[in-house]
Image (cartoon, rainbow, N blue to C red):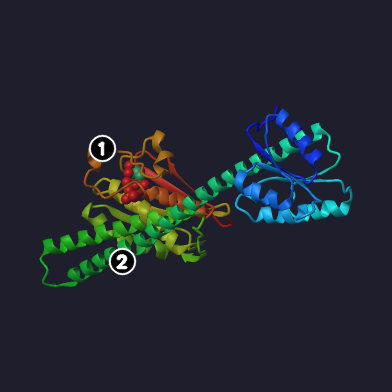
Amino acid sequence: MSSDAAAKILVVDDNEANRSLAKATLEDEGYTVVLASGGAEGIAAFTAERPSCVLLDVRMPDVDGFAVCERLRALPRGDETPILFLTALRDVDTFDRALRAGGDDFLTKPVRPTELVVRVQTALELRRIKAELRDHYALLKKQRDDLLRLQLQKERLTAFVVHDLKNPVNTMDLHAQLLIRDKELSPSARESAAQIRTDARHLTRMIMNLLDMSKADEGQLAPKRAEVDLPELVRSVIAELEVSARSRDVKLRSAIAVPRVVADADLLRRIVTNLAENATRYAPPASAVTISADRTDGATELRIADTGPGIPAGMREKVFDPFVQVEAGERQVGRTSRGLGLSFCRTAVEAHGGTIWVEDASPGTTFCLRLPDEP
Ligand SMILES: Nc1ncnc2c1ncn2[C@@H]1O[C@H](COP(=O)(O)OP(=O)(O)OP(=O)(O)O)[C@@H](O)[C@H]1O
Ligand SMILES: [Mg+2]
């Protein structure tokens, strides 16, 4: 039985006996057969009958098989319909011409009925597979296009975050700075302005953290390494956090025994800021947060230590996941923190070929990051 029994086959042959034999053979297999006795008639039948497969004699008095084949290929559906040549000319030349004309297969006469059936079945099967491939291709192409579109949307969003969010937040910070310089400002207004500065910086930090994590997702977070003056970097971080630390009565201390480290200055600064900001926030009043650095074999280790509530052992890995915060629920309401700081830190440390972890340091928390000299 044929695998495509409903298929219609067009047989184009000027020889009546050949036509009849092909018709009988194929009809026995369940195919519908349409006959044409010359090239022109064959072309007309192709358009009228829309066959699934064409058997085409090469030598015909009006238009020869090769010319018919070329004309069929140019018609609608002509490209996807298998065309099998039938010829008594058993030579390589004819075979080559048949292929050049766009034939799918080539049968020499006299054609044995079983061979004819197998070749037709194969041609139809190939056509089916081709159509399937085309569908798969179309699906893949659609998925790729969807992905590209998403990617573009994401890039637009990133650009939006950078320009439309970062800039006004920076402007807010600038204006708050201007206010603070105003000698006539009342102490409470000054305090408010300082609070605006703290929050604006926090917002900027969150925006930058998000941006860098999305860059890392796309493999685009490449640290720009250079020699960094580590004591100076820590000094500037402490200066930045000074106001909020003082408002909590927390002292920020620096104990850096490493003068220089090779790293991306901006990323490293933000890593330390995020860790020191967390430490300051969790440190109890009248306590100190210490930022220290030491050399160990082939690496620099930085530690940010506080004497706050600590992080439960079961959470010490998880806190580095995005949006994870230890104390869920009410205490979070109204806070601007979103649990991105540590994810950014891990992303940025790993981009340097380094590692970051929470040390067992009760009471309190010590974050440690190790930056190898050779990443
Ligand atoms: N020094 C610390 N002491 C105690 N808990 C900490 C400390 N640092 C981080 N955590 C816990 O880990 C969580 C995740 O920290 P992370 O810095 O990622 O987020 P966040 O500070 O809550 O928000 P964001 O940094 O995005 O503003 C914090 O919410 C807190 O529960
Ligand atoms: Mg944080």
**Disc 2 element:** helix
Q: Is residue 80 visible?
A: no
Q: Is residue 347 visible?
A: yes
In x, y percent, where is residue 3?
67, 31
Disc 1 to disc 2, C-alpha distance: 31 Å
What's under tag 2, amino acid-wise? Answer: Asn
The answer to whether 142 appears left or right of 108 in the picture is left
Which tag, 1 or 2, sits closer to the chain's start? 2
In x, y percent, where is residue 145?
50, 53
Query: Which residue is the site of mark 1?
Result: 329
In x, y percent, where is residue 4?
65, 33
Figure check: 87 above or below 374: above
What crowding class fits label 1: few (fewer than 14 Cα within 10 Å), some (14-19), or many (20 or more)? few
Ligand 1 sits in quadrant: top left
Query: Which residue is the site of mark 2?
Result: 167
The answer to whether 360 appears left or right of 15 in the picture is left
Q: Residue furthest right?
A: 91
Q: Can you say which quadrant of the picture contains the N terminus?
A: top right
